[in-house]
Amino acid sequence: MKEVEVVNAHHERATLRVGEVFLKIDTDQSNTEVEVEAMAPVPTPEVLWRRPPVLALATVPGTALGRLGEPSTASAATGTAAGAAT
């Protein structure tokens, strides 16, 4: 079995990574529905499956701009370009 990494967690939502899949678990299912709808018009990870309260997302190809809790190694121009793409 692949390692489970907690990417983000608080009292309402948790995001886990298992290999190349992200699992988003939310106490309010309407938040997940809104997120899926918002992802439609922009390049986003593929929704692999939804089984409330879990949303499974594929990883997005490319280079990470940063990691939670670590300083970003990306240039300011890279961050600006990423923001402009959405």
Image: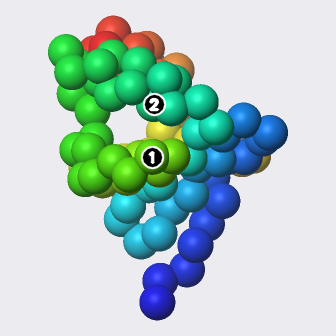
Q: Residue at x 48, y 23 (%)?
A: 30
Instruction: Report the residue marked by disc 1.
Output: 52
Contact? badges 2 and 1 (CB < 8 Å): yes
- Comparing 27 with 65, the one in front is 27
Q: State which mark lies toward you, 2 or 1.
A: 1
- The answer to whether residue 67 of the structure is visible from this angle is no
> Mark 1 or mark 2, which is nearer the start of the sequence?
2
- Residue 26 image offset from top left, x and y in percent: 59, 39
Image coordinates of residue 39 in percent, x first then y, are: 29, 23
Q: Residue at point 61% right, 66% down?
A: 5
Name the kind of residue labelled 2 in the image.
Thr
- Alpha carbon of mark 2 to alpha carbon of mark 1: how far? 9 Å
Left or right position of 49 against 70: left
Residue of label 2: 32
**Displayed quadrant of residue 3:** bottom right
| Crowding near the residue tagged with mark 1, few <14, some 14–19, many ≥20 C-alpha atoms within 10 Å | few
